[in-house]
Image: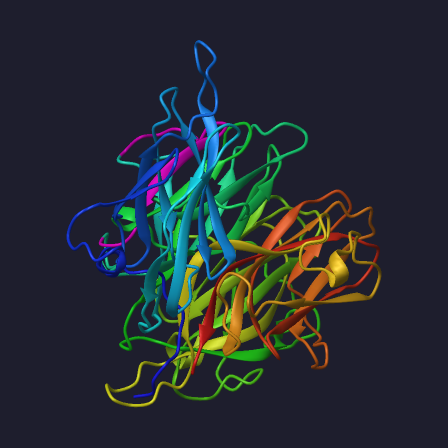
């Protein structure tokens, strides 16, 4: 079995061993104005450190409102992952530090608290971050695990998620999902939104972690928009869903899960390749899929996928030229019963796109079902999950390292752009994004999972293609959009030299990308 040098968060118990030598109890660091206390956090091992203290208020007004402060971890002189918190009028505060973006090694660590009036710096101490294995994937026939319209996953509570509302969904240890799952693949759909004209968004992240500056779904009132989400599992085996404005019903269909061992599937990235296009007869007859109709696609041997040893495929699926009315597409393994689940919801408007991780069914095929109207279906393969191998056998692909989402690109703010330039990506423009070194992604990562969003395009209708930097741009697309849309899609893309390239076909658009995790084989 190969040794894999992969990133892992701090193990809470190990932190306590390192903090000034105290074992099995909270440890305090005294500073001129502030006292910090650390203790193991709840949730998967190595992901959380609780902190609390006093002396960080910066207002003497009566009555004193809650005040903002920032908890900082400094590693060898570099500030990492500031965690905002609120103190009360007496200066008491508490929070949770999510350590999953730390990389293996030993660090000199300084803890500080800053505020308008008071603050301090604790004494340096050493923290050792160990190496542990990544996670392997188990694909399943999709199954519904959340539906706020009928109480599925909410304990029977039937209620949309309100403005600034959060719901926590327990996934690990529920149904077939093992209790030690590190991440889950969910197809998340919003419907029935009352968002204002500017729209709203939903963020999905591991429960117990700070809510990230990221979004997974962007939508408007009256729409039904899906997006694939691969979320790290948080406290008590849960993931959290936040809605920004208005109210919205949320539906989530489980596609599979990751576990921290070598018992399941590893991922092999490919250069994107078109394997299905009903407009020209690629992979299926040249005919639209009608109401209640289905087509089967033989994925084995297509687009670089081998003919044997494949458990699931990652497909970017697009519907276009649909005749209406509003419909949905379901993708599932051939030979099994079609599940109560959907992968794409669409209308007779512009093309709609979503990533699908589909378990391979009978005869090496996956099936595509269209509910109403007629539509063309396009699928571009991104990679595949190899079938599990015997214990002690070298893994054929990469194991997964999930993190809380981290923003790696935002052309609106100059994040991740050359020289920090601010500006939209123009017609036939390409931007190379350095991913290695951001959010803990190591130089040896083979592929990265990105939630990519197009925003503020003045038109015309266009698409984005992601591909490994330095390679030929493929005949494929990852995200289709029209003027005025803010629309995301999940992308699993192979890295080359730690970079990925993003191409825009027509017009111009802002592009935002948030890292969800990565695969690594070394």
> In the figure, is residue 367 to the left or right of 209?
right
Nearer to us in this view, 66 or 53: 53
Residue 107 lies left or right of residue 178; in this view the side is: right
Viewer-nearest residue: 136 or 413: 413
**What range is drawn magenta here?**
156-173
Which quadrant is the N terminus positioned in?
A: bottom left
Q: Main secondary structure of the magenta part?
A: loop
Q: Say which quadrant the C terminus sits in.
A: bottom left
Looking at the image, which is closer to me, 321 or 12?
A: 12
Q: How many marks?
A: 0
Protein image colouring: rainbow
Q: Nearer the viewer, residue 370 or 60?
A: 60
Q: Residue at x 34, y 61 (%)?
A: 126
310 to the left or right of 448:
left
Question: Would you place residue 520 above or below residue 111 in this image?
Answer: below
Name the residue rendered at 72%, 60% in the picture.
417
Query: Is residue 151 visible to the viewer in this orientation of the structure?
Result: no
Asked whether residue 170 is drawn in magenta, I would say yes
450 part of magenta stretch: no
| x then y, percent, for residue 125 | 34, 57
- On the picture, is 121 further left or further right than 191? left
């Amino acid at each position: 079995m190969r040794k894999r040098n992969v990133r892992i968060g701090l193990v809470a118990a190990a932190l306590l061993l390192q903090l000034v030598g105290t074992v099995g109890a909270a440890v305090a660091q005294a500073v001129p104005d502030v006292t910090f206390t650390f203790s193991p956090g709840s949730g998967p091992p190595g992901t959380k450190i609780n902190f609390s203290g006093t002396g960080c208020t910066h207002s003497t007004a009566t009555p004193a409102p809650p005040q903002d402060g920032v908890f900082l971890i400094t590693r060898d002189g570099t500030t990492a992952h500031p965690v905002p918190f609120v103190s009360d009028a007496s200066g008491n505060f508490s929070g949770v530090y999510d350590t999953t973006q730390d990389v293996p090694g030993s660090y000199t660590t300084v803890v500080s608290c800053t505020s308008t009036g008071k603050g301090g710096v604790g004494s340096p101490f050493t923290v050792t971050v160990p190496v542990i294995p990544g996670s392997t994937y188990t694909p399943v026939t999709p199954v519904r695990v959340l539906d706020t319209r009928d109480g599925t996953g909410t304990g029977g509570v039937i209620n949309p998620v309100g403005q600034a509302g959060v719901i926590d969904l327990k996934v690990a240890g529920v149904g077939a999902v093992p209790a030690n799952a590190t991440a889950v693949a969910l197809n998340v759909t919003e419907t029935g939104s009352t968002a204002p004209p500017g729209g709203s968004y939903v963020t999905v992240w591991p429960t117990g972690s700070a809510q990230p500056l990221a979004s997974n779904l962007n939508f408007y009132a009256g729409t039904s928009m899906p997006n694939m989400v691969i979320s790290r599992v948080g406290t008590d085996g849960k993931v959290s869903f936040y809605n920004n404005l208005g109210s919205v019903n949320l539906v989530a269909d489980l596609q599979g899960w990751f576990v921290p061992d070598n018992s399941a599937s590893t991922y092999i990235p490919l250069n994107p390749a078109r394997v299905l296009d009903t407009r020209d007869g690629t992979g299926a007859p040249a005919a639209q899929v009608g109401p209640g109709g289905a087509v089967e696609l033989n994925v084995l041997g297509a687009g670089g996928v081998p003919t044997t040893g494949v458990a699931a495929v990652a497909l970017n699926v697009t519907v276009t030229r649909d005749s209406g009315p509003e419909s949905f597409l379901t993708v599932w393994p051939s030979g099994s019963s079609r599940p109560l689940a959907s992968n794409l919801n669409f209308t007779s408007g512009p093309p709609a796109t979503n990533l699908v991780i589909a378990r391979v069914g009978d005869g090496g095929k996956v099936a595509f079902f269209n509910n109403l109207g007629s539509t063309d279906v396009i699928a571009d393969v991104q990679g595949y999950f190899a079938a599990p191998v015997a214990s002690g056998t070298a893994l054929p692909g990469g194991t997964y390292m999930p993190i809380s989402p981290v923003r790696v690109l935002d052309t609106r703010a100059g994040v991740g752009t050359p020289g920090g330039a601010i500006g939209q990506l123009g017609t036939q423009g390409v931007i190379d994004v350095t991913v290695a070194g951001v959010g803990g992604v190591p130089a040896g990562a083979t592929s990265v999972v990105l939630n990519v969003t197009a925003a503020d395009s003045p038109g015309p209708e266009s698409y984005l293609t992601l591909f490994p930097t330095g390679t030929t741009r493929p005949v494929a697309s990852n995200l289709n959009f029209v003027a005025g849309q803010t629309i995301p899609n999940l992308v699993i893309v192979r890295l080359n030299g730690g970079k990925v390239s993003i191409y825009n076909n027509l017009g111009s658009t802002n592009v935002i990308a948030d890292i969800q995790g990565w695969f690594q084989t070394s």
